[in-house]
Amino acid sequence: MHELSLVADLFTIIEEQASRAGAKRVTKVSVSVGELAGVVPELFRSAFQSYKKGTIADKARLQLKMVKIKFKCRNCGHELTTRNIMDESFSYVCPACGSKDMELIAGRDLYLEKLEIET
Amino acid sequence: MGKETKELLVLEDILGSNKKIASSIRKKLTENGILAINLLSAPGSGKTSLLEKIGQKLKNKHKIGVIEGDIETERDADRIRKAGLPAWQITTHGACHLEAKMLAQIFDQIPADLDFLFIENVGNLVCPASFDLGESLRIVLVSTPEGDDKPKKYPEAFITSQVLVLTKCDLLPYLPFDTDRVIKEALEINPHLKVFKTSATSGEGLDELGAFLEAELKQRRSQHA
């Protein structure tokens, strides 16, 4: 359960960006969450709701966009996108060439994509 | 007075501040020729016991330091000190993982002439995987009593590690733990994992692990010489 410390870092970025843009208020916060970023969306939301009180984003809505996990085969370059890495049936084998050498290239990141602000 | 709504494109990494601090820690450690090793596992899988034993093996030839991450208490650091190794305790007061900034706060206490710096993360196989501490090597531990189904349940820890250490292997005769299954699953997730079967009680596998760490230290120093 580390969502609160992530939300604290998120608010550092929000306040910095909002003040640089001369915002009076932040009305919407859009965050992209990798499926393998170790973030539970519900916990992130509730941490956001309690953290936003008294900040410039007091009334802001939080939009979470989930980003799928993507592997790239180191052998043939084939890219494989999946949501269900936790699924028993998921296999870490390249469907194109059968290589087991798959590199994780997306799904671990957590990004503040954009803000909607009032100036 | 009209208010204007507009969209601001940000695209900033929320883990960015941690990554920045971790990179600067990694740079300093590498410059000083220190091999930093981040140990990840569930609580009670034997991180501290492994460190006591491996530390004793390495300390005759090398200078070793240990950072202990726990939610509360100095207990683990005390155990390491009793084993004759310098230890620094970080208590996270509730946080379930170590972050680079926690290391940065005690970094000036760490001697610059160390060979190995072991960082024992908070016992948790989930959250610590997301936080780079500036280490050069990440070891994930699975103990035999925990069960052999861990790799696919906690894939991030296994994907981001370079070494898998199975601990408490002296208990294998008494447990329904399928060593081959764990290794097979772990290698399916990350075929580059180096695997060691160990026991801090019987001493099994500790020489091999120690020799591997020494070889890593030597190789990394020659790369940065």
Image (cartoon, helix red, strand yellow):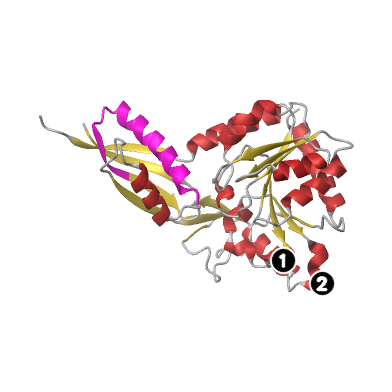
Res. B145 mark: 1
Q: Is residue B141 above or below residue B63?
A: below
Residue A24 is situated, as x and y percent measured from the top left of the image, at 23, 31
Q: Callout 1: few (<14), some (14-19), or many (20+) C-alpha neighbours within 10 Å?
A: some
Can residue B31 be found in the magenta stretch? no
Q: Is residue A30 visible?
A: yes
Give me the residue at 58% from left, 58% from top: B155
User: Closer to the N terminus: mark 2 or mark 1?
Assistant: 1
The residues bearing labels 2 and 1 have C-alpha atoms spaced at a distance of: 11 Å
In this rendered view, identify the residue nearer to me: B46 or B39. B46
Residue under label 2, please give it.
Answer: B173
Q: Position of residue B209 (x, y in %)?
A: 81, 50
Majority secondary structure in the magenta region: helix
Identified at 32% across, 37% down, the residue is B9
Element type where label 1 sits in the image? helix
Q: Position of residue B188 (x, y in %)?
A: 64, 62
At 52% from the left edge and 50% from the top edge, which residue is drawn? Answer: A105
- Host chain of mark 1: B
Judge left or right: residue A1 versus residue B82: left
Image-quadrant location for residue A75:
bottom right
Farthest residue, direction right: B60
Q: Quadrant of the C terminus of chain A?
A: top left
Amino acid at the residue labelled 1: Pro
Segment colored magenta: A1-29
Residue B33 as seen in the image, left or right of residue A89: right
Q: Residue furthest left?
A: B1
Residue B17 in percent (x, y) is at 49, 34
